[in-house]
Image (spheres, grey):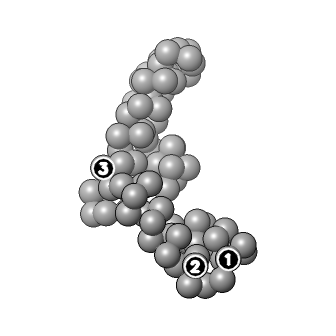
Amino acid sequence: MNFIAAGLLVFMKEEHAFWTLAYICEKLLVNYFQKHVVGSRVDSLIFALFMKKRLPRLSKHFKKIKLHVSTIVTSWFM
């Protein structure tokens, strides 16, 4: 969340940045910044399916070394 807030503060006054951040977290990134981070987990699974279709060799390699894609992409999505 800090990257989003910092980006907003570059272009907006503090109060407007706060309300924009609140809107992003509550309306656009639903379930991303809650206890179980369901939104991020769902997006990780979708990314894994996309990777299996578009990058099958990489997907097979991850499976072979028992590395779930969520280990890598969660920080990207957050």
| Residue closest to the far bottom | 14
Q: Residue at x 30, y 50 (%)?
A: 38
Which dot marks residue 16? 2
In the rendered image, residue 63, in percent from the top left (x then y), is placed at 42, 24
| Disc 1 residue type (three-letter) | Met
What SS does tag 1 mark? loop
What distance separates the C-alpha of mark 3 from that of mark 1? 29 Å
Q: Is residue 1 above or below residue 42?
A: below
What distance separates the C-alpha of mark 2 from that of mark 3? 27 Å
Q: Mark 1 points at which residue?
A: 12
Task: Evaluate if marks 1 and 2 touch, with contact meaning CB atoms under 8 Å apart.
Answer: yes
At label 3, counting other C-alpha atoms closer than 10 Å, the crowd grade (few under 14, some 14-19, many 20 or more) is: some
Q: Residue at x 49, y 75 (%)?
A: 19
In the rendered image, residue 35, in percent from the top left (x then y), is placed at 27, 63
| Disc 3 residue type (three-letter) | Val
Residue 8 in sight from this viewpoint: yes
What SS does tag 2 mark? helix
Q: Is residue 73 above or below residue 5?
A: above
